[in-house]
């Protein structure tokens, strides 16, 4: 399974030692030493590839099924021999204005951490590298890995929320700009942005309950002294969740305002069309009446009748134009 196992190492007193070819022997070794733990990282394993890992580490079948199928909500599940945590790291592509969520699963147990990731983007490599330069943190065992990974994922939520906020401000400026763009494209852009925020919300919202549980005593395989650190992660998650909720509310308000603008604009257009139709109807009506073949009509045989009718039409048109202009219809 070389291609599936991304990294494998034993950490003794916070110092990295390369994992043996047989990770089952490495796990026994770490447990025998007492102050060591094994960190095994995997990327999108298949059922057959993960069978040996699950049997050697004693992972629960339901957790294994979730880890293999992915498409899970962020959650925390406690089993007899391990703790199963699902996180959803997110990335934001500023060029395409898209939020992409991947999945990261952690099995935390007695002297081991098994991480399974799905998708291209993952913070694990950077987290492992940073922790290896902080042996004083790694000395705390698997709990330190769980905290560091959770903290990195949640902190990146705040960064993504800030980028979304910046793009939303630009979108808001475009919606309320004096020179308006095509309304159909603007509405579609707002709706697409709202879908990206919804994707982000699926990652942040369900994680609140697992982080709250990790702050409380009684969770196995998590040291009590780590509770303040998970409380800090929970505070950051609250900030990210509030930012996402604010983005969603503001998008709804912008969409409502944009639809109201469209309604007002349509009413303005209808008033203008009606006003111009009225201006066109007056001379059409008069010309239509005098175009009929009748002998007895006012001014018909008067030599000044023709210019009089033209002047009358002009006066009526100017009067209507001024009236419509004063009322804001033109």
Image (spheres, rainbow, N blue to C red):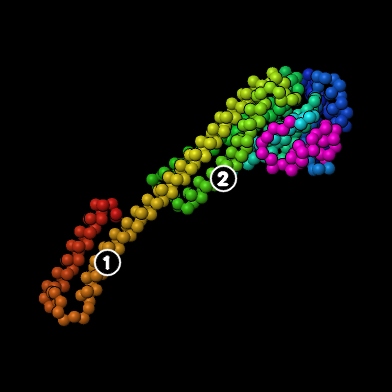
Residue name at image x 68 percent, y 22 percent: 217
Whether residue 262 is situated above or below residue 202 in the rendered picture: below
The CA distance from mark 1 to mark 2 is: 48 Å
Res. 32 visible in picture: yes
Is 45 left or right of 315, judged from the image as shown? right
Q: 229 or 7, which is in the foreground?
A: 229
Residue name at image x 36 percent, y 54 percent: 267
Residue that badge 2 annotates: 195
Quadrant of the drawing holding the C terminus? bottom left
Q: Residues within 10 Å of mark 2 (few under 14, many from 20)?
A: some
Residue 33 magenta-highlighted: no
Quadrant of the drawing holding the N terminus? top right
Main SS, magenta region, reads: helix
Q: How many marks?
A: 2
Whether residue 110 is situated above or below residue 295 in the rendered picture: above
Residue name at image x 32 percent, y 56 percent: 271
Residue that badge 1 annotates: 281
Residue 61 sits in quarter: top right
Q: Residues within 10 Å of mark 1 (few under 14, many from 20)?
A: few
Residue 76 magenta-highlighted: yes
Q: Position of residue 216 (x, y in %)?
A: 66, 23
Residue 329 sits in quarter: bottom left
Q: Position of residue 215 (x, y in %)?
A: 65, 24
The magenta span reads 49-78
């Amino acid at each position: 399974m070389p291609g599936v196992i991304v990294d494998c190492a034993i950490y003794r007193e916070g110092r990295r030692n390369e994992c043996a070819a047989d990770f089952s022997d490495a796990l026994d070794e770490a447990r025998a030493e007492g102050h060591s733990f094994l960190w095994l990282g995997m990327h999108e394993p298949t059922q057959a590839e993960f069978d040996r890992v699950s049997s050697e580490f004693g992972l629960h079948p339901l957790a294994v099924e979730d880890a293999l199928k992915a498409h899970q909500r962020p959650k925390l599940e406690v089993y007899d021999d391990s703790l199963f945590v699902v996180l959803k790291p997110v990335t934001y592509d500023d060029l395409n204005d898209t939020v992409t969520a991947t999945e990261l699963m952690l099995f935390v147990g007695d002297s081991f951490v098994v991480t399974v990731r799905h998708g291209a983007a993952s913070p694990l490599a950077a987290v492992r590298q940073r922790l290896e330069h902080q042996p004083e943190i790694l000395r705390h065992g698997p709990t330190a890995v769980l905290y560091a990974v959770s903290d990195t994922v949640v902190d990146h939520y705040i960064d993504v929320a800030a980028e979304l906020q910046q793009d939303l401000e630009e979108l808001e400026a475009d919606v309320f700009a004096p020179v308006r763009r095509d309304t159909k494209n603007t509405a579609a852009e707002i709706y697409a942005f709202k879908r990206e925020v919804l994707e982000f919300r699926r990652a942040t919202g369900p994680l609140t309950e697992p982080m709250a549980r990790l702050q409380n005593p009684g969770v196995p395989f998590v040291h009590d002294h780590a509770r303040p650190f998970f409380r800090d992660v929970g505070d950051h998650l609250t900030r990210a969740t509030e930012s996402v909720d604010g983005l969603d509310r503001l998008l709804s308000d912008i969409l409502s305002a944009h639809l109201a603008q469209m309604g007002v604009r349509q009413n303005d257009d209808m008033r203008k069309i009606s006003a111009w139709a009225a201006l066109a109807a007056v001379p059409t009506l008069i010309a239509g009446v005098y175009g009929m073949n009748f002998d007895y009509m006012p001014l018909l045989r008067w030599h000044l009748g023709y210019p009089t009718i033209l002047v009358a039409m002009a006066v009526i048109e100017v009067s209507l134009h001024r009236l419509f202009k004063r009322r804001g219809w033109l």
